[in-house]
Structure formats: structure tokens, C-alpha cells
Amino acid sequence: MSAIKAHNYDVIVSTSISEELNNYFKDKGEQYSKVFVLVDDNTIQHCYPRLAATVDLFKDAELIEIEHGEENKTIDICVQVWSTLGERGADRKSLLVNVGGGVIGDMGGFIASTFKRGIDFVNIPTTLLSQVDASVGGKLGIDLNHLKNEIGVFNNPQGVFVDTSFLDTLDPKQVRSGFAEIIKHGLIADAKYWETIKMVDHTDVNQLSVLVDKSINIKNDVVLADPFEKGLRKTLNFGHTIGHAIETHFLETEDMLLHGEAIAIGMICEAYLSHKVAGLSKEALDEITNFTLAVFGKVSVTSAPIDAILGLMQHDKKNEKGVLKFSLLSAIGKCEINQEVSSEQIQASLDYYNSAIQ
């Protein structure tokens, strides 16, 4: 077990967090009038029963279930949950425990932060993606008009409890999706970690679980230095400017991509831009491209019109006065923020990706 000191809360990482949860709620549970647990249709089947059987506070908690998936991260679902909380007598002394992946953590935290001007919440991330990414940072929100995280707030949970044994419940695509964020952490912050990542069997959750603690620490160090994304924290967006646009474009198609699958494409495209704009060597570009394709395979994005991708990218929160701003690599382990990129260069990066998968 390890305890990572985030901003005003701890991230507890363990292979079984029931004891830690019982200790936490033993000290703080009595201060809450009611406890609600937000789950989706996956976590209520695969994860919540483990907790309900071993965590004392959950025996009297009230469950709220929603459907899984990014397509449900909307204001309509928030309204349903707010209404349910109100109907079941939630007050400002209630606690919301979010058990699930990134959608549950983002949306559940947003719901808690806005219900009656804010109630406490605790996050228990159950996917690799949510454990290494959403577990730290205080970014909460929902999608609007299919734009990712368009509405949201910065607010921290009371605590985060990461149980790596939940990785056993994931299908291989979900595990691989989370691995994209681990790759990103090495690329932007730690060349030595990148070398470790390349040696890991990404299909083995036991090997991946060892990386969870390191990735959380990397993100936590960045967030502690820049909690509101004024500078250094922008480096965490490497691969996400193009990746989010691709994810959004395919969200309501038969070719819908998981977050990590889209970010993998975004990292290859933005590694190309890094080579052209920020000084990343051709050797490093080839290394990133070859490794990422070996993990994620070849997904064609030729059906994504450049105008549509550029239109979606205009909503990226790093942009200033309509100018597209990227976080790009000058070397593996080193990331530069506020890099201006033209639409022609973005088109070239998509062309590079499509040529790489031929």
C-alpha cells in the first residue's frame, strides 16, 4: 500500500483497499447524514460486490446506477442523478462515493460539486485509465454537444482509493486504453520510465499494476506544481488535442473509439508535429510511432474530414484567441507547451499517421 499526497487529499494505492476504506470511514463516516454510491452497469456487476461485502459503510449506502460509456456523460444524466439524490433525502452533509471508470469519476464529482452547492465525494477508480489519469487533478465535468469536458469545475475529492485488483475485471481493450496514458507519462516527463514502459507486456495486468503508482506520482507532481493548468499542467495534454477531436468525431459512429485508442492516434500525430515544430528527432518519432502502433494496431482515420477535426479542435481549452496551441515533445521525457501549429501541419500529421498504418 502507498499513500500519495495530492492537493488536500490522499490517493491510496493498494491491491485491496477494503481495509483502508474501513479505516477512513471509521474516522469520518459519522459526519455524513447519508451515503450514496454512484455506479454504472459494469461496476455494479464486477466491482461493487467486492466492496459491499467488505466495507462496513456500504452496507447502509444507497446505490444509484447509470449506464456506462462516454455517450452517457451528459447533463441529462446529471439531472437524473441530482433528482434521485433529492428524492432520496440527500442534504449538504451527504457523501457521494463514485465507483467506476473515468466517466463515473468525472461526472460523479461534478454532480457532487454542484448539488446543494457542493457535497463531499470520494472516488474509487476501477479502470486502468481512471486509476492513472482521473485519480489526480480535480478536473470534473461532462460533455456538451459531443464536445468532451465542455462543462465542468476544478474540485478535489475527500480521498481517492485505487485498488489495482479491479484491473482483473477489465476486458483487454479497456486495459489497453488505459495504457495510452501511461505511455504519455513517460513521453512527457521521464525518459527512463519510457524505457521501462517499452519492456512491459501491456496484456498482463499484473505487470501494468506495478506502473500505476509511478504514473500517479508523475501526474501528481505536475498537478501540484500547476493545479489550474496555467503552465506545466498543459504538458498532460500531449496527444489529446488531436486525440480528443478524433474521439469526438467517431463518438456516434459504428467506429467509436475508446479514449485511449483515440489518444494513441493523437500521440502519433502530435509526435510528428513535435518533430516538425519542437525539435523531436526523427529517431524518436520513429520509436514512438512504431511502439504505439505495435500496442494499439492500425485504425484508419481517413473517414475523418480535416475540416471536422479542425472544427472540433477549435474548442480545445488550451487555445488562445483562436490560435491552436499544442503541447509537443522536444525530446522523449521533455514537453514544451503553447506550441502554435497550422491547419496545414495538422493535415500533414494525419497524413503521416495514415501512411504509417499502410
Image: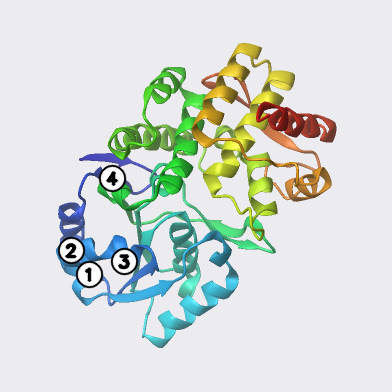
Q: Is residue 68 above or below residue 128?
A: below
Please give the name of the residue rendered at 51% of the width and 61% of the height, measured from the top-left corner.
69
Disc 2 on helix, strand or loop?
Answer: loop
Disc 4 on helix, strand or loop?
Answer: helix
- Image mark for residue 45: 3
Q: What residue does disc 4 label?
A: 164
Lower position in the chain sequence, tag 3 or tag 2: 3
Lower position in the chain sequence, tag 4 or tag 1: 1
Q: Which of marks 4 and 2 is in front?
A: 4
The amino acid sitting under disc 4 is: Thr
Q: What residue does disc 1 label?
A: 58
Crowdedness near tag 3: few (<14), some (14–19) or many (≥20) residues, C-alpha within 10 Å: few
Disc 1 on helix, strand or loop?
Answer: helix
Q: In this view, does 40 lie to the left or right of 229?
A: left
Q: What residue does disc 2 label?
A: 55
Lower position in the chain sequence, tag 4 or tag 3: 3
Crowdedness near tag 4: few (<14), some (14–19) or many (≥20) residues, C-alpha within 10 Å: many
Crowdedness near tag 1: few (<14), some (14–19) or many (≥20) residues, C-alpha within 10 Å: some
